[in-house]
Amino acid sequence: MAVYTEVGDEALAAFVADYDIGGVIAFRGIAEGVENSNYSLRTGAGDFILTLYEKRVDPADLPWFLGLMRHLAQRGIVCPLPVAARDGAALRRLCGRHAAITTFLPGVWPRRVRIEHCAPVGAALAGVHLAGADYPGERRNALGPESWAPLLERCRARAEEVQRGLADELHGALAAILAGWPAGLPRGHIHADLFPDNVFFLDGRLSGLIDFYFAATDPLAYDLAICINAWCFEADLSLNVTKTRAMLRAYDAVRPLEPAERAALPVLCQGAAMRFVLTRLYDWLNTPPGALVTRKNPLEYWRRLRFHLAASDEHAYGL
Amino acid sequence: MAVYTEVGDEALAAFVADYDIGGVIAFRGIAEGVENSNYSLRTGAGDFILTLYEKRVDPADLPWFLGLMRHLAQRGIVCPLPVAARDGAALRRLCGRHAAITTFLPGVWPRRVRIEHCAPVGAALAGVHLAGADYPGERRNALGPESWAPLLERCRARAEEVQRGLADELHGALAAILAGWPAGLPRGHIHADLFPDNVFFLDGRLSGLIDFYFAATDPLAYDLAICINAWCFEADLSLNVTKTRAMLRAYDAVRPLEPAERAALPVLCQGAAMRFVLTRLYDWLNTPPGALVTRKNPLEYWRRLRFHLAASDEHAYGL
């Protein structure tokens, strides 16, 4: 939970005055989100989200992210639409940060995933992949496979603090994943972080997707592997194959999976689990006491990784 | 900043179904607030705040707090109005906590206090005191003068970690404050925590008061002393007498201060500063690493206390 940058009321009023959205009526920090500072902003024109981009986001990427959201929204994906100020620019400065106002999306993210959430998520993800196909430019995935070995190296010395033998086990698994990493799969723009807190539901239907600030250009099926990790494991960290089947079938109905993508599911899921083990492990070891974010246990993804390492083929996921 | 209790979407839907306010449309954790978990809740009937009461609040006090808010709102004070469910009860249970829905107030709290905020705050505080006069029952101020010596005792051994000699200085000051504490001042229900983040402004006018969960029955002028501490010191911790004068005059215009209340201002301000030194000191020494709240520096109130100890009479505050 996070509001890292406090926005003064005078600074806020001056900032909002550059837009054609009326004056500020209400302004509250939002507890969700760990990367940036987010505020609910109500003006005479309605409800918006004000985001101040904090240190983890590379400012050079922001135009690409905002452009992607605009591109997707124009193609019917319900996602935050960046609001341009009177001069036409959506990306601005506030309190020493890059900042943007986006539209407010109704809905509630599911704190507990149920089977009926999984098909809509699969279908929505495929919709993002199709809608993004003609979005120009590429963004290298800074947390893609080539980042994993250096990240593990930086955690290696202290990984034992989390679990005995963890560094060696991760090292072995990573070598196998990278050796088996598929080439030639269909690529495109992926969300790369479509966890439950980034998906809103309203009246039982998916009502919006948020937080495109990890989006990148990578194999599309890898995005699905991230969603399997994020949505389809139970609290006891066993895979719910009914959930994966629902998600995969719904995805496939919108954007049919190629045989090579199906065959690559185990290694893609291994890689996705590895990515979250490593970033959580790094944060676990490097979050200072008293920080505003709750550290997430890396071992939850280590246990998912172990499941995927044991999966012999796509049938393990109900395909 | 705080959301201590995550509310599942099914639990939320079931909870809201007990009210005549339509279905859930949006739900976001609010970053502000350190005592309870607060959510922005939008339903078919509009915007609300959902509060889950966490461990610092005594459940036995909740009916009194909610009743006070209802009482004040009915008398024209703009404060959150508890919303009753279909069975007539506003205080309910959710996720193992006591919980209530209140109305949403527009406005923005001032991150930086300006002189023009101070008169409206003084007038609003006097309005609360007058409107509360016929609210029945009393609540003992659990953080009133009789709590300060025990609180200091609990911090004493470790106060040196914060500043050398702090425990002895506080001990001496506290003895003087308690010896000079006035008896016989007009009493009533006080807000007791009317800091800037509990006061909203909209279009340059005070638009609402929130967070009545420290309210208690105590000398009314003590509430004013808390506001002087909270609103009238500059960033360099010097008192801005223009601010105190504006606040005191505006208060006095709504509820005239008695001579005894004016004369007691220095000791009341000393006591108010002492209360915040002590609670912040206690929290400073007892907040575990990794907690979700930001610790506040107790020495900021120690420096205010020193100012008040040097104040010979009410003229120090511009009266």
Image (cartoon, coloured by chain):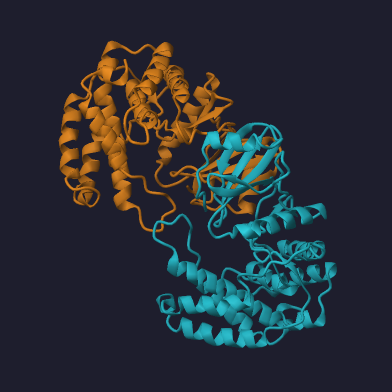
Chain colours: A orange, B cyan
Q: Is residue A17 visible?
A: no
Using the rendered view, name the quadrant where residue B148 is placed: bottom right
Using the rendered view, name the quadrant where residue B46 is placed: top right
Q: Residue at x 31, y 52 (%)?
A: A286
Seen in the picture, residue B178 relative to A262 is either above or below; the reply is below
Name the quarter where the C terminus of chain B is drawn: bottom right
Residue B25's x, y, as percent? 62, 32
Q: Residue at x 30, y 43 (%)?
A: A298
As rendered, which of B84 and A233 lies closer to the eye? B84
Q: Residue at x 43, y 13 (%)?
A: A254
Seen in the picture, residue B53 relative to B226 is either above or below; the reply is above
- On screen, residue A169 versus residue A308, left or right, reads left
Residue B288's x, y, as percent? 41, 61
As rendered, which of B1 and A7 lies closer to the eye? B1
Q: Residue at x 79, y 68 (%)?
A: B251
Residue A26's x, y, as percent? 66, 45
Using the rendered view, name the quadrant where residue A184 is placed: top left
Seen in the picture, residue B239 relative to B127 is either above or below; the reply is below
- On screen, residue B136 versus residue A184, left or right, reads right
- On screen, residue A252 versus residue A83, left or right, reads left
Residue A80's x, y, as percent? 54, 31
As rendered, which of A243 and A80 lies closer to the eye? A243
- On screen, residue A47 versus residue A240, left or right, reads right
